[in-house]
Image (cartoon, rainbow, N blue to C red):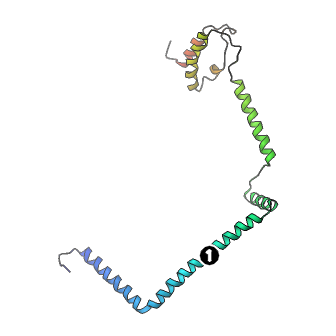
Amino acid sequence: MDPLEPDAVLKARALQVGRASYVAKLKQDHGDELAILKRNHANEVTELEAKHKVALADAETQLAQSSPAVLHQEQAAMDFCIGRVREDFAGQIARLEAENQRLREVSHRHKVRPNVRGTPSQKQAPLRVTKGLIKLTNATLLLKPVDPVSLNVPHYPQVAQKCCNPLRS
């Protein structure tokens, strides 16, 4: 040992020497017992793995052999325990069809009516304005299709544009 080494290094070496001597003493005194313990632990691990594999295989075969009625009863019991309500397949189909019908009605309400009159230039001008109105949350009334000729509001695109850009005059 070098007398110039720091105390921390000396302490670490002393601990290493102390640990090594302790392990050597344990091996001398209880070497056979340690080997037996290691062997037993390895055997226990392999036995547990084997039991787990057998249990998994049994569960898979039992699931494959179970009838649908038994599986349905087990599922119903689990649903009852956790408080979940399952609807039957016909109920799901009816609910989905009702939702689709509602969505069709909503989309049909917002379609552009084919009988809207006006020249192509009159129809093109509001397109830019409509794109701007989509971004505004309080301008939903102005997004509905309008026939300015039948309403006798020929300046409707300018009105909508003012609503879209209030700073512009």
- Decide if residue 86 is in sight here: yes
Q: What element carries label 1?
A: helix
Taking 128 as reference, is 66 left or right? right
Residue 71 location, quadrant: bottom right
Residue type for callout 1: Ala
Residue 105: x and y in percent read 74, 28
Q: Is residue 44 above or below residue 56?
A: below
Residue 92 location, quadrant: top right
Q: Is residue 138 above or below residue 122?
A: below
Question: At 37% across and 87% down in the image, what residue appears?
Answer: 24
Residue 149: x and y in percent read 67, 8
Question: At 72% across and 67% down in the image, what residue appears?
Answer: 61
Taking 163 as reference, is 149 left or right? right
- Using a 10 Å C-alpha cutoff, classify the residue at mark 1 as few (fewer than 14 neighbours), some (14 to 19) or many (20 or more): few
Residue 125: x and y in percent read 57, 13
Q: Is residue 61 above or below residue 2?
A: above
Residue 85: x and y in percent read 76, 52
Q: Nearer the viewer, residue 104 or 164?
A: 104
Identify the residue under disc 1: 50
Question: At 77% across and 65% down in the image, what residue appears?
Answer: 65
